[in-house]
Every structure is written in structure tokens, then in C-alpha cells.
Image (cartoon, rainbow, N blue to C red):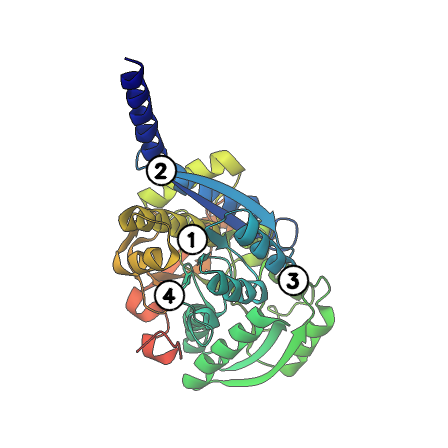
Amino acid sequence: MKTTGFILTSLAGILLAGSAYAQTAVKIGVLNDRSGIYADITGEGSAVAAQMAADDFGTDKGITVEIVSADHQNKPDIGSNIARQWYDTENVDAIADVPTSSVALAINDITREKNKVFLNSGAASSDLTGAKCSPNTVHWTYDTWALANGTGGAMVAAGGKTWFFVTADYAFGHALERDTSAVVKANGGEVIGAVRTPFPGTDFSSFLLQAQSSGAQVIGLANAGGDTINSIKQASEFGITQGGQSLAGLLMFVNDVHALGLEVAQGLVLTESFYWDLNDQTRAWSAKFEEKTGKKPSMIQAGVYGAVLHYLKAVEAAGTKDAAAVMAKMKEMPTDDPLFGKGVVRVDGRKVHDMYLFRVKKPADSKGEWDLYETVATIPADKAFRPLADGGCSLVK
């Protein structure tokens, strides 16, 4: 009997061990700006969005999900150190969000080196799916090519033929100016000047005065977050739009417009991939997000949700969290979530979906605190992003 008891006990132990082994533990690190000029559009809200994706994915699939977060302070060296520590010693399988293109490009390289997965939602540089593309990176929400063709194309079509750029002096600003300049020129416009501003910045007065004195019909703001908010406020103080020049906010978020107020922001044209009031599904999800955070989500935070949810579905489908297998599934499986609808992840890592051209409402037309946009046009997915063959990505055969 003792022998039989020992055998039964051993079998029970083996079964328990097998059950534990079948559980796949996935750890996702949300890396972004939690204290600086991008904290409002990324920050804690992105960590909340990632947790919402994990919750909606469910706990009945043999996959446990842990979400951790950290502040890269918009500095590539700090972001790189966190990423290496996460990958090397803290068993992080994927890094999500990462605004600030200079940081994102560094994480892009480290993730490839460590053979993990990078779910970028926050950075804009189209180089992430172009010259710097990686088999380990998905670029989800938007990029400089999409912004340039949306807002830039619309402004030129409306008669804004001469442009002057006020550009944040780092990878994102340079890429946005480059991609928008190409659109302006391709549509018969002219770039008559540009000025590079320190990042981050607070006083844009001298740069805006240069733009004003240029006489350009459109002043393109190739910046984001707090830099864009400050630029628009100061431009209003100088009477730039009252003098007949137009401001193009080349990367703006609903949070920026909310912070500016409709009196200052009314009439601005901008391009986004998500707005909380698009349809019943976006409204329902955004209401849950607002309950947790006290505000509506930015498109970056929505993108974190979509990217994390698709990643977890791919882990389930692959039956492993091996990076190569998961990335293959992410590109093989169509994407489908309540915020972006149906889409695909291309071979270059670009997530493709519709983009939207919005105009900021006049105060009299707004029915509530967050009722800020009217839809000017829907840019279909096949037109919204750079053609696959044009990016120079080495993964495209």
C-alpha cells in the first residue's frame, strides 16, 4: 500500500506540474512619458488601456498577463536602460507604447537584439516601418506619413500652397517635416522655410515670429503634446491666424484640444486614427476608460489597447510566447477590436486601418466637454498609410 500511495502521489505531482506548465505567463511593459509633455496623451492612461486589453482578453485561455510600467522621460538612454533591464532580468516579453521617436528607435533595435516584441503606439516616425523596420516591431496607431498626407494634403488642397515649419528638433519632428514637405511639393506647394526648436520647449515666441514674418500661408507645427499646446497659445497671442496665416497642427490629440479650449482651437484641421465619439463601440469603451482615468482616451492610448489585445490573441493562436512565432501570427491573423475595427499588420510591421480628417468645432456647436471634433473625411486604410513598396523596408521582398 505504501508503494501504491507513493505512485499515486507522484502521478498527482506530475499532473499538477503539467497543469502549471500549461499556463503561459506573459509580461508586458508599458514604457512612456509619465511626467513630461506627453504624459497626458500616454502616461498612466496607456497602462490602464493595456490592463483593459488584458482584462478583455480574459483569464480562461491558459495565459496569465502581468502589466508593468515605467517612465522613459523622453530620453533614449533612460528608455534603453529600462528596456534592457526588463528584457534581461525581469522577464518582460513585450514593450508597448513608447512615444518620442528617438526613444522608440532605440527600443526598436534593443527588442530585435533580444528577440522580444515591440508594440509601438506612441511614436510617429515612419522610419519604424521604413529604413529602420524590424521583424520584431509592430507600429500600430499612426505615423508621420499618414499625418502628412491627411492634414498636409488637406491644407494644400484648401489653398495653403506656401509653408513654413516650426519643428521639434529630434527624430519625430524631422520625420514629420520631411514627410509633410514631400506632400506639399507633390501637390504643387512650396516650403519657404523652417526653424528647429529645442525639445521639449516652453517659449516659442522667436520661432513663431520668424514663421509670421515669412509670409507663408501655412505654418506647419511639426511638434506634439505640450509643445503644440504652447505653440498654438502663443500664436494666438501674436495674432498670427487673425493676420491671415493658417496653423497646421500636424500631430494633435483630443487631449490637446481639450486643454486649449474651443475658443483657441476652433477651426483647426487635424488627422487621427481614433476618436472616442466615432461609433457605439468607441463610445462604450471610452466611457469605461474615463471611469478609470477621469478623461477620454487619446488615440495613442486606444492604440495600446488594440496592439496588446492583438498580441495576446497571437500568443494564444501560436501556443507560445516565442517572439518569431507570435509576430508571424500577428501578421497572419486579421486584426479586429472595438476601437479600430478590422485591419491587418503588414509584413513591414505597419498596422493598417482607416484614418480620419477632423475639424475642431466652434464653441457654439459643441454639446459637451469632450464634444470637440466634426469629421471632415474618412481616409480609407489602403490610402491612409505609405504604400508597402515605398518604405525601403528590408522585410519587403
| Tags 1 and 3 touching, CB below 8 Å | no
**Residue occupying image coordinates x 49% and y 60%:** 114
| Residue 285 seen in this snapshot | yes
Q: Which residue is disc 1 drawn over? A: 303
Towards the viewer: 317 or 11:
11
Q: Amino acid at mark 4?
A: Arg
**Residue occupying image coordinates x 50% and y 47%:** 91
Q: Which residue is disc 3 drawn over? A: 77
- The image position of residue 4, as x and y in percent, is 27, 18
Q: Is residue 321 left or right of residue 161?
A: left
Q: Is residue 292 above or below residue 358?
A: above
Q: Amino acid at mark 3?
A: Asp
Q: Which mark is residue 34?
A: none
Q: Mark 2, mark 1: which one is toward the viewer?
A: 2
Q: Is residue 110 left or right of residue 4?
A: right
- Quarter the C terminus occupies: bottom left
Regarding mark 2 in the picture, which secondary structure is present there?
helix
Regarding mark 3 in the picture, which secondary structure is present there?
helix
